[in-house]
Amino acid sequence: MNTVNEPRKATTPARIDSPRGAWASHWAPELRILLVAALLAAYFQFVNHDFLLSNASLVNLSQYVAPVAIIAFGEIMLMIGGDIDLSAGMVFAFAPFMMVFANDAGAPMWLAVIAGLIAAAIIGFINGAVTVYLRLPSFVTTLGTLFLINGITLTVSRGTPAATPGSPGFAAVMGAWGYSEIIWTVAIAFVMHVLLRHTRWGLHTQAAGANALGASEAGIHVNRLRLGNFVIAAVLAGFTGVLESFRITSIDPQAGGNQIMFLAVAAAVIGGTPLTGGSGTIVGGLLGAAVLGILSDGFTLIGINAFTFNIILGAAILAAMIFNIHVGRIRRRGAR
């Protein structure tokens, strides 16, 4: 039997992205925010030459960025799944008082700090359990606990500040030294980035945020993830409050509040995490906090008041949300 050799059909080789191109595509959102931060820093340095060259200015910048960024990391974990924690600012004030009470009861400082974080974790668990198992919107749940925790803090403290306990060395590590907070922030950012991008917990959180029903049908415990992320967010908020209490050597029941919570959410949104959920980035949240810090300190140095900062902040949040929604639509069209 004769065989006829048919000519081979020409095939187009599959396009293989270069490692450099894949890296740039993966980090594109963070690179855009980094560029914005660099341009803002360059502008304020040009206007005021002490902006980046003064140690006092760098300390002020790092101490502004650190608490906003750490709380933002927890909010990002929640926002990816479509949740939010409005009570974070009140947990910020509550945890340090629990630390003081534990220390007054005889616990060493390291154990007292853990006691404060456990108290924060309990609040996060309550937020998560009510939201997940009673099927209340997280906005409603955490709005209620916001007032509840604030009332408890004011009651147990009698509305008066308390001195931060501990030795000078312990206090320096926990926030009293000018750069200790930003070192904690970078370390926590690294851990949270690994958790979100390179562990089953983080990958499942992203999958559940993008398609909760599909993730549930694939065997992912969506409710368990949401509950756990509420605990993570509360612990980070409580730890931030502990760091700040050591920095200012005082624990104020009125500290934190809604201001720092909204700044953290703003940092997350500016960093590329949409309020609609489905995606998010820890590095973006850190850079978003840096942008807010640069704007705040820069405006202060050149003599612009806080009202203008709020105008710029509101415009930046709107612009970031519009941009995130637009990019999401483009990605969905490209996936079809």
Image (cartoon, helix red, strand yellow):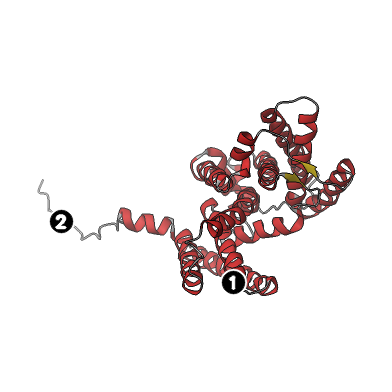
Give SS at disc 1.
helix
In this image, 226 relative to 148: left or right?
left
Q: At which x and y percent is residue 110?
A: 66, 30
| Closest to the observer, 300 or 185 | 300
Q: Which mark is residue 319?
A: 1
Q: CA distance from mark 1 to mark 2?
A: 58 Å
Q: Name which residue lies at 57% across and 39% down.
A: 201
Q: Which residue: 53% across, 45% down? A: 183
Nearest to the observer: residue 289 or residue 121 = 289
Q: Residues within 10 Å of mark 1 (few under 14, many from 20)?
A: some
Q: Quadrant of residue 97?
A: top right
Q: Position of residue 45 (x, y in %)?
A: 48, 69
Q: Nearer the viewer, mark 1 or mark 2?
A: 1
**On the image, numbered disc 2 is attached to which residue?**
6
Amino acid at the residue labelled 2? Glu
| x, y percent for residue 290 | 55, 59
